[in-house]
Image (spheres, grey):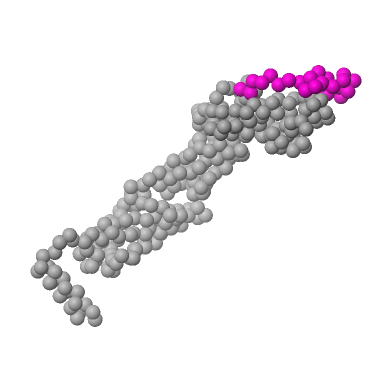
Amino acid sequence: MGRDYYAVLEINRNATDTDINKAYRRLALKHHPRGSSHACSAERFILLAEAFDVLSDPRKKATYDKFEEEGLKGGIPSELGASGAWSSGYTYHGNAEETFRQFFGGDNPFADFFTTDGSEVNTGLSTLRGQKEKIQDPPIERDLHLALEDLYYGCTKKIKISRRGPNNIPADIVFVIRQKHHPRFVRQNDDLYYTAHISLEKALTGFSVEVETLDSRLLNIPINDTVHPQYNKVVTGEGMPLASSPSRRGDLIIRFITHFPEKLSAKKQQLLKQALTDPIINI
């Protein structure tokens, strides 16, 4: 049985010209020797180019659809070619890189997508809150590293996209939102977590903790409870804006690390023991 070019491009026999172009674009990028370390990539890359060379040409495709690979490569009687099918035997020129260059319109389709030409894509708060913003398919991933402040304010990011193939098929990109490390906060969904370091004295007697917010306000938060190992202070409405309702916010959750003294004198130990066992404390 001859080679199935449709199966090579992972499409069915009813595929349109656009389907053929999209399939070749996706698979050629995936299996190009410069972009894949798989042992069979070079062989698959050449086969993809041959399949595209046949199916993208109406006369070659007509011959292949009717007579399959044997008729295409062996040639057919001229009287059978009246419908446009080609009568001489077909041989692929074997230069998969040339087919690749002709399709992509250049030597390096792996170049950076983000240039000063092309269309503009705006990425606002509603999309930044998700994990991925899918522009088109098939996916070529590009990372967007954003500061926590960007997510907080909902700043619009502008990205230039210019890569297009000669068949006017747009390059397909998935933007993966990656949050940069923040020196003060850790974000979990709509909540912000802040860690405060305190002494044992403060943990037992009370204190205030100051927290600078993402919009540069200074919160002074009184802690009147005893800070035990499982204690967290929840400050309502000081977290991240909600994607569904930016006027509302999650919570600021303050966690505490209590630092114990390395050594206590005998006198301090006695005073502390008396204080903790004083009946007044237990009332």
Residue 145 can be seen, yes or no: yes
Pick the front one: 44 or 123: 44
- Identify the residue at horizontal 53%, vertical 32% (top origin): 37
- Identify the residue at horizontal 69%, vertical 34% (top origin): 8
- The secondary structure that most of the magenta stretch takes on is loop
How far from the left and from the top, in percent, is residue 79? 90, 20
Residue 220 can be seen, yes or no: no
- Identify the residue at horizontal 21%, vertical 77% (top origin): 281
- Identify the residue at horizontal 43%, vertical 42% (top origin): 146
Q: Quadrant of residue 232?
A: bottom left
Q: Quadrant of residue 13?
A: top right
Whether residue 5 sits left or right of residue 195 in the image: it is right
Q: Residue furthest left?
A: 267
Quarter of the image where the C terminus is located = bottom left
How far from the left and from the top, in percent, is residue 29? 59, 31
How far from the left and from the top, in percent, is residue 184? 33, 50
Pick the front one: 244 or 34: 34
Q: Residue furthest right?
A: 79
Residue 74 drawn in magenta: yes
How far from the left and from the top, in percent, is residue 252? 38, 58
Residue 84 drawn in magenta: yes
Whether residue 193 sits left or right of residue 265 in the image: it is right
The span picked out in magenta is 73-97
Measured along the vertical axis of the image, is residue 268 above or below residue 246?
below
Measured along the vertical axis of the image, is residue 89 above or below residue 110?
above
Whether residue 174 sits left or right of residue 260 in the image: it is right
